[in-house]
Amino acid sequence: MTHVPSSDSRSPDVFADFVFFHPCYPCYPWSIPVRNAFASQLETLAATDDRIVLLSGDIGNRMFDAFKQKWPDRFYNCGIAEQSMVSMAAGMAMCGLRPFAYTIAPFITARCLEQIRVDLCYHALPVVLVGVGAGLGYAELGATHHSCEDIAMLRSLPGMTVICPGDAFEVRAAMTDVLKLEGPAYLRIGKKGEPVVHAQIPREFEIGRGLVVREGDDVCLLSTGNVLPIVCEAAGLLAQRGVSVRIVSHHTVKPLDVDLLNASFRHFPLVVTIEEHSLIGGFGSAVAEWFVDNSPRRGQLIRIGTPDAFPHETGDQDHVRAEVGLTPDAISQRVWRAWMNVAKEHALR
Amino acid sequence: MSTPADIPSLEAAARRIRGEVVAMSHRAGAAHLGSALSCVDILVAAYFGVMRIDPANPDDAGRDRLILSKGHAASALYATLAERGFFPRNWLETYGKHGGRLAEQPAPRCAPGVEAATGSLGHGLPLGVGISLAGRIQRRDYRVFVVMSDGECNEGSVWEAAMFAPAQKLANLTVIIDYNRWQATGRSNEIMALDPLAKKWEAFGWRTAEVDGHDIAALTDAMTGAGSGNGSPLAIVAHTTKGKGVSFMEDDNNWHYRAPSAAELNDARAELGLAVA
């Protein structure tokens, strides 16, 4: 990857969405650090909405400098104390503020789950929890920093909206739209260096409505979260083998876009969920629950996600993704095999 | 604001509230009676002597807030709010009843004057910190009072917030700890090393005061010391007796779980100088 300019968060003008050249087909050949997109979008929103307050769990070194400078009384480093940070955010929301509480994904979810459940969900308060480094985003820091169970935990909470944007543009769109919600939301975002999938902020973005990012006829890949660029690459590989693939970014895991799911299962003989999250309780589980309850016609469902195990081997995100089968190659092979079976069954009929 | 001359009438209100609390526990068969009786004088001092509130406008943005973080003592809060005029006294008869709005631990917005759903311990203080900061951000001069139990100080989230509030110089925040020296199944100092409790808060950067938690005048004075603007938050360690006001319940931890019989209710009301059924 060639850097144009440095991605270093200590750089003074980090609010520019730095563009990196990226060799990833069929996404756009550049990437935007998702967390910088978050910081930049928050600044944009805060400029016209004085209810917005940013709480950080002692991360984002220098990334929020501009925000702090502009609105010193609307930024709080709450320390390494996620439980009290979430309760504090609830207290602020009770008074009409719109807090965004930001830290590394496992620490804004598992660490303070009970505060989320009681103070945010039970009270139905509009606090946005922002988990950075979703899934394996902090792979090299070890499983303490992985977050492959957060969707499962948060979507089980009454009233919680769970949003997993697929790229930096979806992050920006989600942040604008999330302010329309009257209850709590979890924004599960990547970290840095992720390729972008959209050319710009998708105008049609709406929480609870999936986005079709590639049209196709044979197989429908339903992606949620930061794995979207990988799914796009996998689709490119499948296309090379003659499989026409539709990709939907189901950026909202809760509530599910059931209309779009219905359409996908009606039209496609094979529907695949893909997520950088455990197969237990994640997006695939949510779709499977819906599938069982609604018995849609036609489509067969398979699910791709992380296994029920902690990775113990040292490695960066790409390394651990390879270990758990979340690479374009592994995904395309898995889908190819399933597609061959489906095609065989259809031929026998 | 009360004047010293009001104290006898506040003490009479406290006796009526205790009578209601015992009756509510009897009718509902509800636990935590000892914990509720323990904090009645704290609540009376706050709601009748200190807080800037208007029961007719319970959601006024400029009101002082009180969070009863020890949600298991909700009956004391409900009875105090009813006595203060936030809602009709006959609502108390629905306490713990099926389909009623007053649960054994308060639900969100269950009644006028109830600021938060509490019951899981260690939530009230950081909630109060958030409300206190919101006051600063929105330039409102209200004060925030958080009533906690001593057992609640076992929770780590209490100390997260305890470290944060002085760093933000939240002078408008006051914690009152109902230090009755019991928690659910034992003496609080035998379970966790709470003492010296006031010194702990002081070491965390709080102004502290220690008072007799059943002396309404002393409580009122201590709470009136709550500040505004930038400065240290205030922690008041209120030394109390669990089951206070009913001799056969005082300092007897069985009343953490027991509910009184009809005869015990009559005895309690007689001791409190109230009409007996």
Image (cartoon, rainbow, N blue to C red):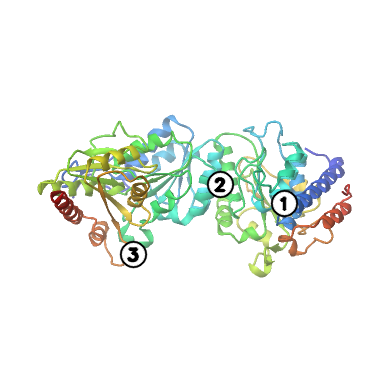
Camera-side mark, 1 or 3: 1
For disc 3, the marked residue is: A309
Q: What is the CA distance from the residue labelled 1 to the residue labelled 3?
A: 47 Å
Q: Quadrant of residue B187?
A: bottom right
Residue A124 location (% of width, % of height): 52, 41
Q: Does label 2 or label 1 sit earlier along the sequence? A: 1
Q: Position of residue B65 (x, y in %)?
A: 65, 41
- Give the camera-side residue of A49 and A174: A174
Q: Residue at x 71, y 60 (%)?
A: B256
The location of residue A160, given as percent across then percent down, is 45, 44
- SS for dot 2: loop
2 vs 1, front mark:
1
Residue at the spot 56% in from the left edge and 34% down from the top edge: B138
B8 relative position to B204: left or right: right
Q: Which residue is mark 1?
A: B28
The answer, for residue A6, to whether it is visible in the render is: no
Front in this rendered view, residue A165 or B237:
A165
Q: Amino acid at mark 2?
A: Gln
The residue where tag 2 is placed is B168
Could you tell me which chain the residue with mark 1 belongs to?
B
Q: Whole-Å distance between the Cαs marked 2 and 1?
A: 42 Å
Q: State whether discs 1 and 3 lie on one chain.
A: no
